[in-house]
Image (cartoon, rainbow, N blue to C red):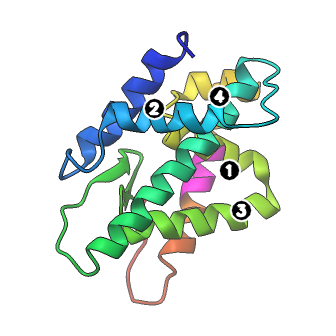
């Protein structure tokens, strides 16, 4: 954990920096929650760096989904500021109903192609760069970029289905 803590703290700080009310979600709390959940794993036999980061990305996703659920129960219909999960997917906000929709869409995508969900978790939930993601899943950066472009489009259409006369601007 001491080796990865600085990177995880940076990722957590980025999420907190996007929050409208930083007192609700604190970077240290987020990393410590991740650490506690990782520590509580009964069969956590991480084989290598790749396996650890893949698992940590899934856990970070669960923590942020839990946070979004908590926010939704507290401020249904509230006029909150738009805070994107990532600059690459600005239509998903931290702590919003869209994050819950993203979670459901990722669950559906995971049934069809778990690899694609792994890319999203590493890139957007754990904050890995495209190069780091490519290294962790052992493909080229070009493959990661191409796959993420497709995935973002698929997720957008899944969360915002056409029919309202809107054009998808991804």
The rendered magenta stretch, by its main secondary structure, is classed as helix
Mark 3 lies on residue = 109
Q: Which residues are magenta?
A: 147-152
Question: Which of the two discs, 4 and 3, labels the residue nearer the N terminus?
Answer: 4
Q: Nearer the viewer, mark 1 or mark 2?
A: 2
Question: Which of the two discs, 4 and 1, labels the residue nearer the N terminus?
Answer: 4
Secondary structure beneath dot 1 equals helix
Examine the rendered structure and indicate whether residue 145 appears above or below residue 20. above
Query: Label 2 vs label 4: CA separation?
Result: 16 Å
Mark 1 lies on residue = 117
> Left or right: 107 with respect to 77?
right
Which x, y percent locates residue 60?
Answer: 54, 42
Which x, y percent locates residue 49?
Answer: 71, 18
Q: Are marks 3 and 2 in contact (CB under 8 Å)?
A: no
Most foreground residue, 46 or 159: 46
Q: Are marks 1 and 3 in contact (CB under 8 Å)?
A: yes
Query: Label 3 vs label 2: CA separation?
Result: 29 Å
Secondary structure beneath dot 2 equals helix
Q: Nearer the viewer, mark 4 or mark 1?
A: 4
Q: Which mark is residue 53?
A: 4
* Residue at 55% from the left image edge and 49% from the top image edge: 61
Which x, y percent locates residue 47?
Answer: 82, 20
**Does the image show residue 169?**
no
Question: Which of the two discs, 2 and 4, labels the residue nearer the N terminus?
Answer: 2
Query: Label 4 vs label 1: CA separation?
Result: 14 Å
Question: Which of the two discs, 1 and 2, labels the residue nearer the N terminus?
Answer: 2
* Residue at 37% from the left image edge and 61% from the top image edge: 91
> Left or right: 22 with respect to 160?
left
Examine the rendered structure and indicate whether residue 70 appears above or below residue 30. below
Q: Nearer the viewer, mark 2 or mark 4?
A: 2
Image quadrant in which you'd find residue 48 = top right
- Label 2 Cα neighbours within 10 Å, binned few <14 / some 14-19 / many ≥20: some
């Amino acid at each position: 954990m001491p080796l990865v803590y600085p990177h995880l703290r940076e990722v957590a700080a980025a999420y907190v920096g996007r929050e409208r009310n930083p007192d609700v979600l604190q970077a240290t709390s987020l990393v410590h929650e991740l650490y506690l959940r990782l520590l509580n794993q009964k069969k956590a036999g991480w084989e290598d760096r790749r396996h650890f980061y893949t698992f940590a990305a899934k856990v970070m996703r669960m923590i942020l989904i839990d946070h979004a659920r908590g926010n939704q129960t507290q401020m249904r219909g509230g006029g909150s500021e738009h805070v994107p999960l990532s600059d690459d997917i600005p239509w998903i906000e931290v702590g919003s109903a869209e994050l819950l929709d993203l979670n459901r869409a990722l669950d559906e995508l995971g049934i069809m192609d778990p690899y694609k969900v792994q890319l999203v978790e590493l890139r957007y939930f754990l904050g890995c760069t495209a190069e780091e993601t490519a290294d962790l899943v052992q493909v080229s950066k070009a493959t990661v970029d191409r796959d993420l472009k497709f995935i973002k489009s698929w997720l957008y259409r899944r969360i915002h289905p056409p029919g309202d006369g809107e054009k998808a601007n991804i």
